[in-house]
Structure formats: structure tokens, C-alpha cells
Image: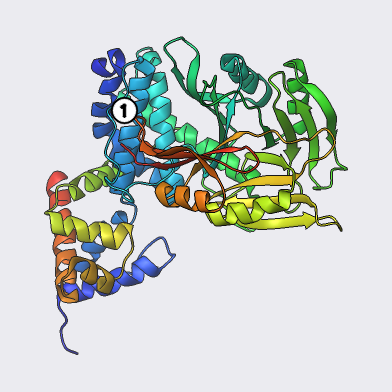
Amino acid sequence: MAKRSLAEQLDEVLQAMLVSLRPRPEEAPDRNLAALMRVAQELRELPREEFRATLKSDLQRRAIMSEGAAAPPARTGKAQAGAVHYQRPGLTSITPYIIVRPAAQFIEFLKTAFEGVERMRMPAPDSSIMHAEVAVGNGAIEVSDGNEQYPTAPAAVHLYVDDPDAAYARTLQAGATSFYAPTDDHPSGDRWGAVKDPFGNHWYIAKPRGWTPRPEGLRSVQPYLHLREAHKMIPFLEAAFGAEAMGVHKSSEGAVLHATIRIGNATLEIDEAHGEFQPMPCHLHVYVPDRDAVYAQALRAGATSIETPQDKPYGDRAAGVKDAWGNSWFIATHLGR
Amino acid sequence: MEAAQSDPAKFDALYELQFERVYAFVATRVRNRATAEQLTSEVFHRALANLPGYEWRGVPFAAWLLRIAANAIADQFKRAAREFPAPDDPPEPAADLDLQASEIRAIEHRAQLFRLVGQLPEVQKQVVYERFVEQRSIREIAQRLGKAPGAIKQLQLRAVQNLRAQMAGGHG
């Protein structure tokens, strides 16, 4: 047999290791090669450079914010697009951005009712809350007191929790009013209850049973939009965000009774407004790989511009549009610096 | 350490020292890259949030970070078990909060290797990331870097040999 170079031999065993699910490589034929393979084995776990850099810049920003100092300077738009993950760490593709007053009290509500964990708070000069982020389950809710450009807008949110009965009881203690207590008779098949909090938000508090859409794990937080002519929202989201309708249940008259729609790694739900569940135009924060393209697509699909794409001092490039139902969509790509 | 306590912006100096160690630890316990990144991120965010309380604990900073990491991993296993109960899968290793000396040595070894990758000649480093992190084929890497496949295999060999030599040197 012709003797192959060490480079060839290493690559051969390495290739076998890289495509194998086995935790250990096959025993290499000679001692020299075996030593190299031990190094190669560990290199499989090498962290991504982009992740290392993104996390560092995120921590720096967090540290600066917690000091109350000025935010780092904005960067120019085209820098390193694609070099970092497009979602800000801790957020998914869709996050409800709830603007209610006083936001500080609302944050307390999230902590008390849903065991929310405050991850970030940026005060405005008048000591109102410019922006805050509260982790709930494996998702998050962003919160602000808002301003003239972004006025108060409570939202409806479907929350998956471990114990809907206990969470429901805590919301009532924290001042919410009940639509109905958790029941097993909800059409979704989930155990499901509904309340309105003192700030006007609706919370559909549920525990999954049986099948649930889970693109990449079940999301604790899903915005829920009650719409007039809800069926028209689906083609809008498909055209604007490349969304995918994952389950559409319609009445015999064609009204959307319930639909789950996926954007990226998260979902939102819609239905035709009915009874006490009337439209509540709200704010949604959507992370996409290319905000400029999505912004243009959204306008073509019939949205109107609130804000053209701009680099933000907090390390995102973001734009804003309003859909035909009055919902505002913040379209962002995390730049990672 | 003192700098980080009095000035959170100095946290990044600690990050430079500790990133590889924390990641190496997390990656030995969870096999999935996305989860490893999520947990590593969580550890540093928790650490940043808790720096003012740190001085009360009489343990070195690295041990404190690994303790946070062990807790984060344990939380993750609980969450995963709740969200995706899969009785047919083998059980995840228990998150043992007490690290054995042998495990600490293995983590240090791996963290050191990760740091050394950063010091490789640029093109060798590139090949290592393309091959091991992005898991690209030799042919694909050759196209991306505009080189012959044989040259990529040579660079791969040199990189691994370099790392092996430096690791051996470091451990006497």
C-alpha cells in the first residue's frame, strides 16, 4: 500500500470524526496521529469567534447601562452584517413591546404574577422608563413608558406557564380582573384561563397539553392579536416577514378562529376579534436577518413607515412600520457591538 | 477583580480572562452548541449582575463563575426535562455542583487550547474555525480560501500540530 502523507491520514480520521455522532473518534492507527486526534476532538467544542465578541459587547453595554453612563457610539450600518447572530441575546424573533404607564408598576406586576425577572432597565432623563426587558419563562417582554411617537398600547399575550391556576390566582391578587378561570374546556385543548391586568393588557395563561406548534421549543411568550378581517393578516405577514402559517382554523364563513404564525424561531397567534376580545393595536419587536430588506417588503405589503432603518446606539439597526390594523412592528437586526 | 467591582465597565477585562474557561466547562456538560452559547451568556450576565455581592464570598473568581455555570446548567436540564420529556433518551448527566480536581484540570486544558487557537497564524486559525466550528468540507474551505484542497489539509495538519506542541509545552 502506498504510504500517504500525515496530512492525508489526519484528514481521513478527522473527517470520520466530524461526521460521526460518536463522542470519541475511532482509535487512530499510530501514536503520533492519536495525539493529534485528541487535540482535534477537543477542537469540536471550540466556541464561535462571533459569539465570543457578541457576548462581550453585550456585557459591556449592559455594564454601561447599569452605570447610567452614556451609551456607546452608534456604528455605521454595513459593518459586519452577518458576522453576529441577528437576534439580541435573550430575545427571540418576536417579542411583545408593551407600552403602559407607569411602566415601573407594570414590571412589578410581571414579577409578582409571572415570576418575571428584570434583565435591563434604562431610565429616561425624566426618570420614566425608556426601555426595560423582563424575562418570563423562556421568553421576554419589553416594557416602556413610551413617548409621543410611541404612545401607550396594551397588548394581549398568550403565556405558557407550569401552573396556570397558581399564576391566574397571583394575577388577581396583583389587581387583574378575570375573564374566566383556568379550564380544561378551552378549544385549544390546553388548560387555559384569561385575565385583564390593571394596565389593560390581556393575559391568556395556559399550560400545554398534547400537540402545540413548537418550531424550536415551546415559547412561553406569544403575542396574541385579535383582528378584524384576521384572514388578511396572514398574507401580510407572509409577504412582509416571510412568515409561515402553522395552523389555521377557520369557521364555515371563513373567519379565522385561531392561527399560529411563525417568524424565525418564534410564533404569534391571531384570531377574528370577538366579544370581549376586541382589537388592541400593539407594538411588536421582530428580529430579522436583514431589517432593510424586511422593511422594504413590509412597505410593499401595505404597511406604512414609522421610522426608516437606522443604527441605534444600543447596537441594533432598526426600523418601524405600522400595519393596516394599527400594530407597530419594530424590525431589528442585532449588530452585536 | 477590584476594578470590576468598583467599575462594571471593567468587567470586560475579566471576561477576556474567563470566557474560555466558562465556555469549556459548559460545553463539556451540554453537547449542543446553541445551548452552550445560551448558558455561557447566562453565566456572564448573572455574574455581572452579582458582582457587587461577590466580595462576600471567599472563593476565587473562576470558581465562583463555575459555580454559577453549574447552577445554570442544572436549571437548563430541569427546563429541558419539563419542556421535552423524552423517556427513551438516556438521562442527561446530573449537574454535580462539586467539581472534581480531574474535571477542573480537563476544563483548564481545554480552555488553554481554545486560547491557543487565537494565537495561531491567521490562515491556520481560519482553517480551524472553518473545519471544526463551521464543519465545512476540505473542498468547500479550499474554495472559500482560494487554495488547493491539498494545501488546506497541510494547513489543518500544521494547525493541529502547533496546538499539540504548545499544549505539550504548557504541561511540561
Residue drawn 85% across the image and 30% down it = A180
Residue A15's quadrant in the figure?
A: bottom left
Residue drawn 33% across the image and 51% down it = A82
Q: Nearer the viewer, residue A181 or A248?
A: A248
Local secondary structure at mark 1: helix
Residue A324's quadrant in the figure?
A: top right
- Percent position (x, y) of residue B97? 46, 33
- Percent position (x, y) of residue A326? 63, 37
Height in image: A291 above or below A154? below
Q: Is residue A173 left or right of residue A117?
A: right
Q: Nearer the viewer, residue B120 or A96?
A: A96
Height in image: A336 above or below B128? above
Residue drawn 65% across the image and 57% down it = A245
Pointer 1 chain:
A
- Percent position (x, y) of residue A331? 48, 42
Is any atom of residue B29 visible in this view?
no
Quadrant placement of the N terminus of chain A: bottom left
Residue neighbourhood size for the residue with mark 1, other residues' Cα within 10 Å, grouped as few (<14), some (14–19), many (≥20): many
Q: In the rendered image, which residue does mark 1 sit on? A: A60
Residue A172's quadrant in the figure?
A: top right
